[in-house]
Structure formats: C-alpha cells, structure tokens
Image (cartoon, rainbow, N blue to C red):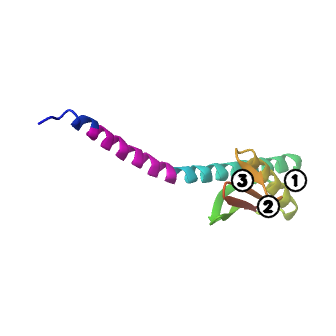
C-alpha cells in the first residue's frame, strides 16, 4: 500500500477547515468592530462638545456622557445619555460635534446634519 499522498490530503483538509473557521469568525467580528468604532467616535464627539460648552459657559456645571446606545436595523439610531439634562440650546451643538467625530472615521459619509452612512447602514444621532 502506497501512502505518499496521504499527508498532502490531510494537510489540505485541515487547512480548509481552518480557513472556513476564520471566514465565519471574520464575518461575525467585522460588523461588531464597525459598531464599536461608531459608538466610540460618537461618545468622543459628545464628550468633546460638552467639555467645550462647560469651558465657555462657566455658569454651567460639567456634564458627562454616561451611556451610548445604538438601536435599529439598517437605519440605526445613536442615542447619547448624560448624567444631567443637557440644555436644549446646546443639543444641536452636541449633535454637530458628534457627527463631525463620526465623519473622521474611514468610509463614513454625511447624509444630512444628523445622519451619516457607513456601508449599507445609516446612523442618526439623538441626544
């Protein structure tokens, strides 16, 4: 019995299984990484905006971003939560800064003043 081709066949079989596992893992991890990048950029933009507001308006107490949630399917909503209520006259400033921060990511394109697009998903910022 000749076993010279046995090692090559086993090697190809093992490599193909590893390749399948890597492809399945990357198809799951890729969108989650994109979502994490969006959430981080939104939080940084909002934090920067409220820090600037507190710096320029000394009568206002410092505000901290406590939570960022992303909900929805292909049209997603990014909701930012703060530890104290944000005055209504500053909401548009915070949203604009958050959108600017999102636009700094690779591949993000503006749709309007509160919405950006990344790939096949749109993200709308709410405060």
| Residue 60 percent across, percent down from the top left | 84, 54
Element under disc 1: loop
Magenta stretch bounds: 9-28
Where is residue 116? Give x, y as percent: 75, 56
Residue 96 location, quadrant: bottom right
Q: Residue at x 27, y 40 (%)?
A: 9
Q: CA distance from mark 2 to mark 1?
A: 13 Å
From what the image shows, is residue 100 above or below residue 8?
below
Q: Earlier in the sequence, mark 3 or mark 2?
A: 3
User: Could you tell me which residue is drawn at 43 percent across and 46 percent down?
Assistant: 22
Return the residue at label 2. Answer: 86
Quadrant that contains the N terminus: top left
Q: Residue at x 40, y 48 (%)?
A: 20
In-front residue for pair 119/33: 119
Residue placed most toward the observer, 79 or 114: 114
Q: On the image, numbered disc 3 is attached to which residue?
A: 64
| Lower position in the chain sequence, tag 1 or tag 3 | 1
Residues under numbered marks 1 and 3 in contact, where contact means CB atoms less than 8 Å apart: no
Which numbered dot is residue 59?
1
Majority secondary structure of magenta residues: helix
- Residue positioned 20% across, 32% down in the render: 4
């Amino acid at each position: 019995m000749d076993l010279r081709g046995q090692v090559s066949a086993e090697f190809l079989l093992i490599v193909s299984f590893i390749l399948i596992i890597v492809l399945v893992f990357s198809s799951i991890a890729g969108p989650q990484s994109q979502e994490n990048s969006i959430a981080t950029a939104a939080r940084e933009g909002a934090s920067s905006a409220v820090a600037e507001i507190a710096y320029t308006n000394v009568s206002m107490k410092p505000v901290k971003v406590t939570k960022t949630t992303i909900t929805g399917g292909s049209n997603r909503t990014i909701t930012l939560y703060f530890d104290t209520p944000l005055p209504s006259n500053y909401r548009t400033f915070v949203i604009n800064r958050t959108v600017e921060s999102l636009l700094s990511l690779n591949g993000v394109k503006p749709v309007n003043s509160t919405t950006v697009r990344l790939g096949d998903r749109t993200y709308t910022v709410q405060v």
